[in-house]
Image: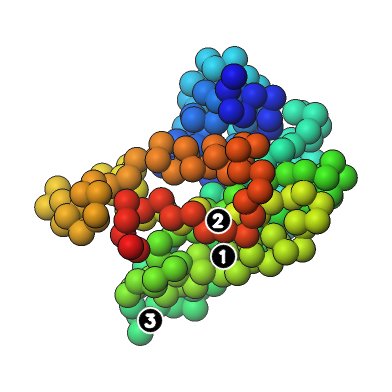
Amino acid sequence: MKLLEGKIAIITGASRGIGRGIAKVFTSQGCAVAFTYSSNKEAADSLTEELSADGVQVKGYQSNAANFEQAQQLVEDVLKDFGGLDVLINNAGITKDNLLMRMSEEDFDQVVEVNLKSIFNMTKAVQRTFLKQRKGSLIHMSSVVGVKGNAGQSNYAASKAGMIGFSKSIALELGSRNIRSNVIAPGFIETEMTAKLSEEVLQGWRDGIPLKRGGQPEDVANACVFLASDLSSYITGQVLHVDGGMLT
């Protein structure tokens, strides 16, 4: 039997990178997927077509998780279209890297709004459904940077560290209703974003990782499958590091 057979998930920011990898692995495990994208309709349509081949319901929604009203509307639409919801994966995120002395207030605010406020918006939007059915799995995509920090990424690190504090608090609030809240902290994952770096830089990163390779989106997706499935039914309030041993 497939690990996510019969489940329904929302995955934010899934038209590329890690989000796309999660969506692909979820549908292969029998999960119906509602995913959001910000602007690239072509990429979203292509993903819908690809995922539908797994024989489960798939639909893309253009929605900004950082907007409270849009998050509420999204969940309403998904419940209407899919008839239920079991899993929320808060994956949407951006970076605007710079040293603090050069970072604008706007760059700080925008990264916190998209990466952290969206977690509040989406979790709040699904809470009523999860409470009513007395079950649900919340999975928040943080980063190794949210745990150890990184020069030039104070805004990103703050948003990703905030996500961990938020998730642990929600785990305490909602645990008695059988609602689980966990965080995944990916390390160096090779996506189309990292493909823009030179091979020399990439190899430098790989050499510093105990497993001597960068992670793939599927590595993160498999961890999400575990936390979304009933295999992890006694796990909440945790941070799962998917980083090849970077923080060991």
**Mark 2 and 1 residues: CB-CB less than 8 Å, in contact?**
yes
| Mark 1 secondary-structure assignment | helix
Query: From the viewer's perspective, is 101 left or right of 57?
Result: left
| Mark 3 secondary-structure assignment | helix
Q: Tell me what residue is drawn at x 15 percent, y 51 percent.
A: 203
Q: Which residue is mark 1?
A: 164
User: What's the residue type where badge 3 is placed?
Assistant: Leu
Q: CA distance from mark 2 to mark 1?
A: 7 Å
User: What's the residue type where badge 1 is placed?
Assistant: Ile
Q: Which residue is mark 2?
A: 183
Q: Examine the rendering and report whether any part of residue 147 can be seen.
A: yes
Residue 62 position, x and y percent, is 62, 40
Q: CA distance from mark 1 to mark 3?
A: 22 Å
Marks 3, 2: nearer the viewer: 2
Q: Which residue is mark 3?
A: 100
- Say which label, 1 or 3, has the lower sequence index: 3
Graded by Cα atoms within 10 Å as few (under 14), some (14 to 19) or many (20 or more), the crowding at tag 1 reads many
Query: From the viewer's perspective, is 3 left or right of 160?
Result: right
